Each structure stands twice: as structure tokens, then as C-alpha cells.
């Protein structure tokens, strides 16, 4: 089969399409998926550079964390899917290949109104956002949410999920155009940030504080995050693009009785991912089926254009997902 292959860790010039060995036959509860489309994530860029190794059991040189395709074969104990069904889901690696072997518990059915490219843009961002903001953060309909890097894939998914529940959402971005685009998705208040911006002062002036923060940025925002939270607020840490180490005033966390939660999806057990996928299938997929939610696609590349796709995502020019088609 053909797959995106990292010849050596480093720049996008080290990517190629290579013929590799097909996965083994599906057995037990496994499902063999013929991949039609995948999507790029920041994790792919890090793995390509050698900074984000694949978990044990997953290919280190074949990228890809999400996919959409058709069931090619099922194991004898797989009961939820059959050959020919359109499915999408998440994996810890290897999604950017013509075939992928996965557990059936990590799959969901693609609604009839979505193409493979549209479906491929959904799983990683929306499962991550739902799990972080609602499952772990416990955001309720009468509360408020702040999303950092709101124009990113996960940020935009969190915005859409919150607005589907009529929740007030603040969002930050370093790009004014992205904030303007987010307003079309219901963003209540956009905050343009740079090194001098104190978003905590803006949040407190406009709303007094927020109940949940989804942080896709990292250390640089940590102290201001604590200052922005209401009593019993929850800070959900997902990304570290602005650093991994921070100093902060512990008394703020104590006096406000804050919860600071770190989360990552890729390295979780199959059981944990299966639970997140089940919630996704039950609570989010029907919203795409009804049209209340829509995929966020910025640009679609053919798989042979993989180098250009990586360079485009690295440019930070994208708004929404960058999708690869086989």
C-alpha cells in the first residue's frame, strides 16, 4: 500500500509517498479500513521533526491521527460494522496510508451528508474538544468558556460545540482575520493577543471572569489564565506551543479553589479512547447529520502534495483543517 513516509526526521522535504507492507488481516474486534482521506494536525509536524514519537505499537515514520474511509474487512468478533460501511475515527498513528487496522470501538459511522474529505476533518478536533471542555472541564450551559487559539482546529471545534449549547464564548488569537472568521461561528468576544496583551484584564472587565479555559498555547498564558477564572474555575491544558514551564502564584489556585487539568488524547488506552469515541458518536455525530455542526476545512491536498500540505500548515495561514485525499 502507499503511505506518507518520513525518510528522516526534520523538514517537510523529508516526506515522500512510499510503498509499504499492508497491515495484517483483521481479527477479533479489529476492522481494516480503506482510507479515503486524512487530516493534518500539529502533532504530525512535531512527529516529522522527531519531537513527538509514536506510542508503542504504532509506526514512527507513517503519520496521521485521524481518517475517513470504507470498511474493507472485519474480524470475526467485530459486530458493529461490515464491509463497505463509511467510517471515521482517531488513531495514535499511521492514518496517512491506504489501509489502517483499528479496533471497532474507535470507529463511528459517517453521516450520509458528509464526504470523506469532510469527515476526515472532524474526529481529532471534535473528540479532543468535547473530551477536554465537557467531559473533563464539566462546562455547563449557564457557564462561560475562554478558548485560546480559537481559530485552530480544536479551538474552532470547541467554539462550535459550546455555541450549540448556547454558551458564551471568549476567544484569543494572534491573527485579527481569524477572530473575524470565528465571529461567523458565533464567537461572542474576540481578543487579539500579542506579547503585551493582558487578556485577564480584558476578561475581568467584560465578564468578571470565565468558568472554563481551554488552553492550546501553554506556559506563556498560565498566570493570566488563573487570574481570568471564576471561583471553582477549571483550566484545561491541551497545547504547549508557548512553552511547557511556568511559575505561578499558588494562592490564586487555593483561594479560588481552581482545578488545573492536563490532558492528551493520543497516548490514552484503547478503553479510554473508546469511551471518548462513543460520546462523540452519540452526542456530536448527530449534530453533523442534522447540519447544526459543519466540518471546518481550510484546504484539501492530494496525498502526493504532502510536502506542500505540511508547509501550508506550518505557515499558520490556515483557518480550520488541512485535509489529505487518497
Image (cartoon, grey):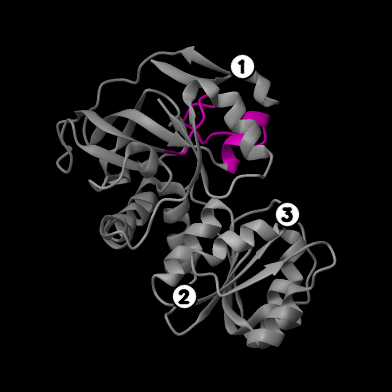
The residue positioned farthest toward the right in the image shown = 196
Left or right of 222, for residue 182:
left
Q: CA distance from mark 1 to mark 3?
A: 29 Å
Task: Indicate which label's residue lies in the foreground, 1 or 3.
Answer: 1
Q: Residues within 10 Å of mark 2 (few under 14, many from 20)?
A: many
Say which element carries label 1.
Answer: loop
Q: What label sits on residue 7 in the rendered view?
A: 1
Q: Nearer the viewer, residue 200 or 189?
A: 189
Give the alpha-carbon distance from disc 3 to disc 2, as whole Å.
Answer: 25 Å
Q: Quadrant of residue 180?
A: bottom right
Q: Where, quadrant-wise, is the C terminus in this rendering?
A: top left
Displayed quadrant of residue 311: top right
Label 2: which residue?
139
| Tags 3 and 2 touching, CB below 8 Å | no
Give the SS element for disc 3: loop
Please check the rendered image and state whether residue 10 is part of the magenta-colored stretch, yes or no: no
Q: Position of residue 79 (x, y in %)?
A: 14, 41
Secondary element under disc 2, as helix, strand or loop, is: loop
Q: Is residue 57 magenta?
A: yes
In the image, the segment drawn in magenta is 42-66
Amino acid at each position: 500500500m502507499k503511505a506518507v513516509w518520513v525518510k528522516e526526521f526534520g523538514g517537510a522535504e523529508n516526506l515522500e509517498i512510499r510503498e509499504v507492507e499492508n497491515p495484517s488481516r483483521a481479527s477479533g474486534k479489529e476492522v481494516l479500513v480503506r482510507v479515503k482521506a486524512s487530516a493534518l494536525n500539529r502533532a504530525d509536524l512535531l512527529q516529522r521533526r522527531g519531537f513527538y514519537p509514536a506510542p508503542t505499537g504504532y509506526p514512527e515514520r507513517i503519520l496521521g491521527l485521524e481518517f475517513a474511509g470504507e470498511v474493507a474487512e472485519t474480524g470475526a468478533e467485530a459486530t458493529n460494522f461490515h464491509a463497505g460501511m463509511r467510517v471515521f475515527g482517531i488513531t495514535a498513528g499511521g492514518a496517512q496510508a491506504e489501509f489502517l487496522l483499528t479496533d471497532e470501538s474507535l470507529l463511528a459511522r459517517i453521516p450520509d451528508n458528509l464526504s470523506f474529505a469532510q469527515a476526515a476533518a472532524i474526529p481529532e478536533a471534535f473528540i479532543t474538544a468535547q473530551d477536554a471542555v465537557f467531559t473533563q472541564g464539566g462546562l455547563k450551559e449557564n457557564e462561560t468558556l475562554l478558548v485560546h487559539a480559537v481559530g485552530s482546529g480544536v479551538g474552532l471545534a470547541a467554539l462550535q460545540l459550546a455555541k450549540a449549547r448556547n454558551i458564551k464564548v471568549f476567544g484569543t488569537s494572534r491573527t485579527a482575520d481569524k477572530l473575524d472568521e470565528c465571529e461567523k461561528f458565533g464567537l461572542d468576544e474576540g481578543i487579539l493577543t500579542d506579547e503585551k496583551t493582558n487578556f485577564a484584564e480584558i476578561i475581568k472587565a467584560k465578564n468578571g471572569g470565565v468558568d472554563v479555559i481551554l488552553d492550546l498555547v501553554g506556559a506563556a498564558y498560565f498566570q493570566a489564565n488563573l487570574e481570568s477564572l471564576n471561583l471553582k474555575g477549571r483550566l484545561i491544558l491541551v497545547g504547549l506551543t508557548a512553552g511547557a514551564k511556568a511559575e505561578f502564584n499558588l494562592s490564586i489556585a487555593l483561594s479560588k479553589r481552581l482545578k488545573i487539568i492536563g490532558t492528551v488524547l493520543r497516548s490514552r488506552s484503547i478503553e479510554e479512547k473508546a469511551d471518548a469515541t462513543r460520546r462523540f458518536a452519540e452526542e456530536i455525530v448527530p449534530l453533523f447529520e442534522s447540519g447544526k455542526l459543519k466540518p471546518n476545512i481550510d484546504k484539501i491536498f492530494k496525498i502526493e502534495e504532502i510536502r506542500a500540505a505540511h508547509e501550508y500548515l506550518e505557515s499558520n495561514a490556515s483557518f480550520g483543517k488541512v485535509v489529505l485525499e487518497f
